[in-house]
Amino acid sequence: MFDERLLKELDADPEVKRDGRSLVMRRAVYDYLRRKRRRAIAEAYRDAYEERGAPELDGWASQGSWPGS
């Protein structure tokens, strides 16, 4: 499943030694899924405003930036 060299490097990390490999991997998966969900939500908002437009926001897009981009 995992590269042995990668697992050895992971196991040498102080946080992994303290909390255990399983907990650290669960945190990593949780963080990955959370970031993926946030990107999907941001993309949905971008798509919605691009399609329908929002006259009250004209000019705003060039002044702001989307989180994570």
Image (cartoon, rainbow, N blue to C red):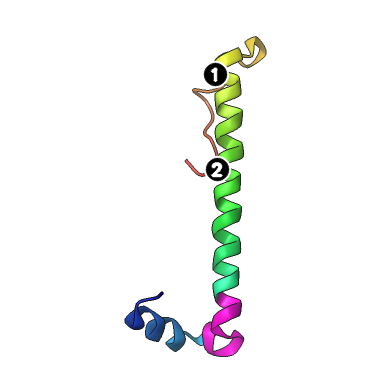
Reply above or below: 50 against 19: above
Crowd rating for badge 1 (residues with CA inside 10 Å; few <14, some 14–19, many 20+): few
Task: Identify the magenta region.
Answer: 15-24
x and y percentages locating residue 33 in the rendered image: 58, 55
Q: Earlier in the sequence, mark 1 or mark 2?
A: 2
Quarter of image, res 40: top right
- Of 29 and 61, nearer the camera is 29
Q: Which mark is residue 50?
A: 1
Q: Residue at x 59, y 71 (%)?
A: 26
Q: Residue at x 55, y 34 (%)?
A: 43
In the picture, the quarter occupied by the N terminus is: bottom left
Amino acid type, mark 2: Arg
Q: Residue at x 51, y 44 (%)?
A: 68
Q: Which residue is mark 2?
A: 39
Query: Extreme right residue here?
Result: 56
Magenta region, main secondary structure: helix
Q: Specify whether residue 28 is painted magenta.
A: no
Amino acid type, mark 1: Glu
Instruction: Tell me the SS state at disc 1.
Output: helix
